[in-house]
Image (spheres, rainbow, N blue to C red):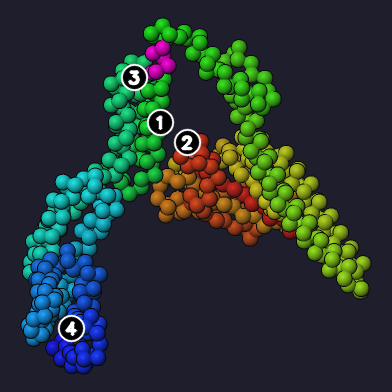
């Protein structure tokens, strides 16, 4: 087939030579001779035939290069056509072999991709090179039809690629912390800050254990490595301060007073006293509550402001439309007033619900016309959707809150932090939301038709997943009450 195509195409190309400039004529001739083989070569490369069918592909390239060199030197067309025909035949064989290898060596190919994505060639070069050699040998055996040896070599290469991948991941996540700990050792940090230094070592060991157990869920080991890195730097800093006491350049009292000073400044900025005669704990707790309340008030104010602006714009549009009408204007204004009164009643009901919960149980806030109960006091065992009996009082208050709006729809939303796989987090958040819905229905008689559930997994964080406190806030159940305007 190739010979027939080349012959017909060559005849047309020869006609062009007489009428085209020399350079263009040369390009036209090359396109005619090499066009179909170039297409075959592109297909082979797309299938990674160079690696999955190394023998046929290499021989095909030898013939292809020979044809290119002969063409560049202006040699006999028949010889060029013959070399290209051989290249085309071998490329076809390499494509067939590559397609077969993609099935037989599928697991090995995936493992190699994982290692490459982890940048194993950079961080584990020796193991990577060894694995590549065995990979190529497996592909070569398969190319010659020796499936048994190909699979044996494939298993061997797969182990090496996984080792290279794990080495690369550890290097990227753990090497900096190891270097910091080595630096700390040289600076005698364990002598001056032994607890913090030991904490850094422990976190590093946890991170490595997590990577060994599951290298594909890197959220946990990455967070642990970052904490270990922080604690190592923290230990170095603490040692530098404590060493001043040891060397007589400072006293313990001066060090404590230096650490109290920022707390006093923060309290002053909050317009609060900071009595430190009984330590810092009480002052810190008061400031934490103050800051949390400010954040919630700011968030609620932002929502209220946006709602007010939207509502004002809507009312202005309605008033303009009503004023433009000559008939029925009085009736429309009455309806508008009634709607505004209904919204005012809902705001009063919102306020009554806010008083039902203390801060350890729930945060209550509004979003548009919905009321959201963020059940901070409702917790679950790790990986579980079981509701403990200790949460009955909190869920009883949730039932009471829904009774304030007897015609409302209730949406129960489950959320997780970023630890664990996306799929498991999504499933767990749905199961927890469903468990709350079932509990409210069975224990407090809320009709199932009023409730719906949704699980969002880790997709809607409200805090930083890089800190334990942030992850705790992200693990939550939100109960959204959607009143019906009368």
**CA distance for labels 1 and 4:** 64 Å
Of the numbered discs in the image, which one, if any, rests on residue 294?
none
Q: Earlier in the sequence, mark 2 or mark 3?
A: 3
Say which residue appears at 66% left-offset and 23% top-offset: 268
Magenta residue span: 239-244
Residue that numbered label 1 is attached to: 230
**Callout 3: helix, strand or loop?**
helix
Camera-near label (2 vs 3) is 3
Alpha-carbon neighbours of circle 1 within 10 Å: few (<14), some, or many (≥20)? some
Residue that numbered label 4 is attached to: 33
Q: Position of residue 300 (x, y in %)?
A: 68, 44
**CA distance for labels 4 and 3:** 73 Å
Camera-near label (4 vs 3) is 4
**Pointer 4 and pointer 2: residues touching (CB < 8 Å)?**
no
Residue that numbered label 3 is attached to: 189
Depth check: give the residue in front, 64 or 145.
64
Inspect this view and state whether residue 46 appears. Answer: yes
Residue that numbered label 2 is attached to: 468
Q: Position of residue 230 (x, y in %)?
A: 40, 31
Q: Position of residue 330 (x, y in %)?
A: 92, 67
Depth check: give the residue in front, 116 or 8.
8
230 lies left or right of 50: right
**Callout 4: helix, strand or loop?**
helix
Alpha-carbon neighbours of circle 3 within 10 Å: few (<14), some, or many (≥20)? many
Q: Position of residue 462 (x, y in %)?
A: 55, 45
**Pointer 1 and pointer 4: residues touching (CB < 8 Å)?**
no
Alpha-carbon neighbours of circle 4 within 10 Å: few (<14), some, or many (≥20)? many
């Amino acid at each position: 087939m190739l010979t027939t195509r080349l012959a017909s195409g060559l005849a047309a190309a020869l006609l062009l030579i007489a009428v085209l400039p020399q350079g263009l004529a040369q390009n036209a001739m090359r396109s005619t001779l090499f066009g179909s083989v170039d297409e075959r070569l592109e297909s082979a490369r797309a299938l990674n035939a160079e690696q999955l069918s190394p023998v046929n592909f290499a021989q095909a390239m030898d013939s292809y290069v020979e044809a290119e060199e002969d063409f560049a030197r202006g040699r006999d067309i028949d010889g060029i056509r013959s070399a290209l025909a051989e290249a085309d035949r071998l490329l076809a064989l390499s494509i067939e072999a590559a397609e077969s290898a993609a099935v037989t060596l599928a697991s090995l190919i995936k493992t190699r991709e994982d290692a490459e994505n982890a940048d194993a060639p950079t961080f584990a070069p020796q193991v990577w090179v060894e694995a590549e050699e065995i990979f190529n040998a497996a592909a070569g055996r398969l190319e010659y039809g020796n499936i048994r040896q190909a699979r044996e070599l494939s298993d061997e290469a797969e182990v090496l690629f996984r080792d290279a991948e794990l080495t690369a991941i550890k290097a990227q996540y753990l090497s900096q912390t190891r270097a910091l700990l080595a630096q700390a050792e040289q600076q005698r940090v364990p002598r001056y800050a032994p607890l913090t230094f030991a904490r850094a070592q422990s976190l590093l060991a946890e991170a490595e254990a997590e990577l060994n157990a599951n290298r594909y869920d890197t959220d946990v080991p990455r967070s642990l490595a970052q904490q270990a890195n922080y604690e190592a730097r923290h230990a170095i800093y603490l040692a530098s301060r404590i060493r001043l006491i040891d060397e007589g350049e400072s006293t313990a009292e001066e060090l404590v007073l230096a650490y109290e000073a920022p707390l006093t400044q923060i309290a002053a900025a909050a317009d609060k006293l900071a009595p430190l005669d009984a330590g810092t704990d009480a002052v810190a707790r008061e400031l934490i509550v103050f800051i949390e309340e400010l954040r919630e008030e700011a968030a609620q104010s932002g929502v209220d402001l946006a709602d007010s602006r939207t509502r004002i714009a809507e009312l202005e549009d309605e008033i303009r439309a009503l004023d433009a009408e000559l008939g029925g204007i009085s009736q429309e204004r009455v309806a508008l007033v009634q709607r505004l009164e209904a919204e005012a009643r809902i705001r009063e009901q919102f306020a009554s619900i806010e008083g039902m919960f203390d801060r350890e149980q729930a945060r209550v806030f509004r979003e548009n016309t919905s009321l959201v109960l963020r059940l901070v006091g409702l917790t679950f065992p790790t990986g579980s959707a079981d509701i403990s009996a200790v949460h009955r009082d909190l869920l009883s208050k949730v039932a009471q809150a829904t009774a304030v709006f007897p015609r409302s729809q209730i949406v129960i939303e489950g959320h997780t932090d970023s630890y664990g796989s996306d799929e498991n987090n999504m499933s767990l958040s749905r199961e927890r939301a469903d468990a709350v819905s079932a509990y409210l229905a069975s224990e407090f008689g809320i009709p199932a038709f009023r409730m719906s559930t949704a699980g969002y997994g880790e997709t809607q964080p409200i805090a930083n997943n890089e800190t334990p406190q942030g992850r705790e806030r992200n693990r939550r159940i939100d109960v959204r009450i959607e009143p019906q305007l009368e």
